[in-house]
Image: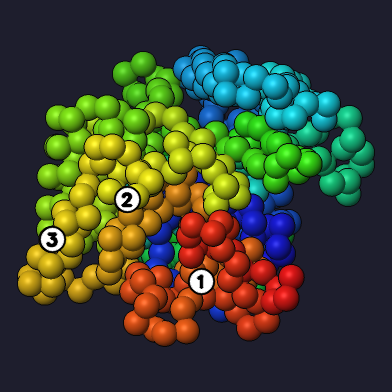
């Protein structure tokens, strides 16, 4: 898997809800979990998985769906409206916070905004860039057997895209179409009963195929293939992730990039995609401002069953505690506190005056978990609780560490990965972060003197 494809695959897989266990980068990530063969994806994009066939199956499929066509669809009107509103709020917030800096589209600004005209253009479209099997998310709805995600990348298709072999400029926005893995069909065209085990078997079989390009695409979409059941009627929601602004490195600051993340559930009654809360994206500001709401959240989360789900990575926080819009900043170590939803909810020296959780609350929950035999794998300290809670949010997950297949990459112990500055005396290291190390030849450098959290860089630099 090329670094470009891997980065795209991981960034979109992490829009929401991806929290695998820790554990060298290899082919295991690809087998039976993702379709990333460029030639096969091109065939699928030109066929039944082109965005027009997925989003507007009743229309003629001969012409690709441009961005202008997509956002002109009646079902997409609430999406465009919500994105515009978030843009305006973002601009106003930065004008108020940074009055001496300029914000706008183009390289002449300190904060360079995403060009929204690209979303109404006839020269851009969303191109299929990956298909991901998320059957591990069956805990959200067992009857649906998890999810299948179609990942589309906004791409310039007009000026600059010359010839069949040309590489079109890719723009910093992705669109996930999330579908139920099973849907409502009890048997397939060959009369095979559809179960979660049968769907998993098909994907595992797809992982063993030696084919590529058109041959692979044909096998995947054939009766009994991994993509046979992936159909427009099974769409559950769409997720958008766009680079709303970028601030280049300057004499007064390091670089910073902000990503706007949103989710839209399909509403069958209105046949539109409606703005919805982001999974586990905590409404930090409202919790800190509303004593009753914060009390309810504290009681709910510290319940032993929910506390164990948080540690395991299968927690689903009730919508009343969540927000419908979030901005994730990179690099995370320099992100403003309001962009890190869980930080500031737990008592600390520099935390809010009335935090939701006192240190004793978390210590008590850890003690109860031990007394009831709950084998916690990630939360072993107060700091571990706060980090885990933050990483389970959409914005935190956008920047968190990954699974064993990612070891040696920027996602796990490789250059640029998150890490914890280890003390020579093991007992002085936080138990939650003892495995957050760097690969050979790299060293963990703290992002600021006030924290031991940092990033992996080449030793001596």
Please tell me which residue lies in front, 456 or 217.
456
Residue 426, percent from left and from top:
39, 84
Q: Which residue appears farthest toward the left when viewing the image? A: 372
Q: Is residue 404 visible?
A: no
State the mark number for residue 348. 2
Q: Is residue 360 left or right of residue 410?
A: left
Residue 246, percent from left and from top:
69, 36
Decide: marks 3, 2 in contact (CB < 8 A)? no
Q: Quadrant of residue 150?
A: top right
Q: Secondary structure at mark 1?
A: loop
Tell me which numbered mark, 3 or 2, is placed earlier along the sequence: 2
State the mark number for residue 421. 1
Q: Secondary structure at mark 3?
A: helix
Compared to 324, does 218 lie above or below? below
Q: Residue at x 48, y 76 (%)?
A: 422
Tell me which numbered mark, 2 or 1, is placed earlier along the sequence: 2
Compared to 192, does 114 lie above or below? above
Q: Is residue 430 left or right of residue 133?
A: left
Residue 289, percent from left and from top:
27, 27
Residue 396, percent from left and from top:
45, 49
Compared to 99, does 278 lie above or below? below
| Quadrant housing the N terminus | bottom right
Q: Residue at x 19, y 40 (%)?
A: 297
């Amino acid at each position: 898997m090329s670094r470009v494809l891997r980065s795209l695959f991981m960034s979109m897989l992490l829009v929401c809800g991806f929290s695998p266990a820790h554990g060298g980068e290899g082919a295991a990530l690809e087998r039976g979990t993702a379709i990333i063969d460029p030639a096969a994806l091109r065939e699928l994009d030109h066929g039944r998985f082109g965005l027009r066939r997925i989003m507007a199956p009743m229309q003629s499929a001969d012409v690709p769906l441009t961005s202008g066509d997509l956002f002109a669809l009646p079902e997409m009107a609430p999406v465009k409206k919500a994105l515009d509103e978030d843009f305006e709020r973002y601009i106003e917030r930065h004008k108020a916070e940074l009055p001496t800096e300029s914000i706008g589209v183009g390289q002449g600004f300190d904060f360079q905004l995403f060009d929204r005209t690209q979303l109404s253009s006839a020269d851009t479209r969303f191109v299929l860039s990956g298909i991901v099997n998320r059957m591990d998310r069956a805990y959200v709805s067992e009857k649906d057997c998890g999810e299948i995600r179609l990942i589309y990348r906004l791409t310039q298709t007009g000026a600059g895209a010359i010839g069949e072999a040309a590489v079109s400029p890719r723009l910093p926005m992705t669109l996930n179409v999330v579908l139920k893995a099973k849907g409502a069909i009890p048997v397939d065209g060959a009369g095979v009963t559809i179960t979660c085990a049968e769907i998993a078997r098909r994907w595992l079989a797809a992982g063993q195929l030696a084919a590529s390009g058109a041959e692979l695409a044909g096998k995947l979409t054939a009766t009994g293939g991994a993509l046979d059941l992936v159909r427009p009627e099974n769409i559950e929601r769409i997720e958008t992730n766009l680079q709303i602004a970028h601030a280049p490195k300057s004499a007064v600051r390091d670089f910073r990039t902000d990503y706007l993340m949103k989710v839209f559930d399909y509403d069958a009654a209105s046949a539109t995609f409606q703005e919805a809360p982001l999974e586990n994206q905590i409404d930090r500001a409202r919790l800190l401002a509303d004593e009753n709401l914060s009390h309810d959240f504290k009681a709910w989360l510290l319940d032993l069953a929910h506390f164990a789900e948080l540690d395991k990575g299968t927690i689903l926080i009730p919508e009343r505690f969540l927000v419908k819009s979030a901005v994730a900043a990179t690099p995370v170590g320099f992100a403003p506190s309001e962009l890190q939803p869980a930080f500031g909810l737990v008592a600390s020296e520099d935390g809010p005056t009335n935090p939701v959780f006192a240190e004793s609350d978390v210590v008590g929950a850890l003690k109860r978990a031990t007394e009831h035999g709950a084998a916690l794998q990630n939360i072993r300290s107060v700091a571990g609780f706060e980090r885990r809670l933050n990483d389970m949010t959409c914005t935190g997950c956008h920047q968190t560490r990954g699974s064993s297949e990612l070891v040696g990459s920027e996602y796990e112990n490789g250059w640029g990965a998150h890490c914890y500055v280890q003390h020579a005396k093991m007992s002085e290291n936080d138990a939650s972060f003892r495995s957050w190390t760097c690969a050979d030849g790299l060293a963990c450098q703290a992002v600021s003197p006030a924290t031991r959290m940092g990033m992996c860089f080449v030793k001596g630099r």
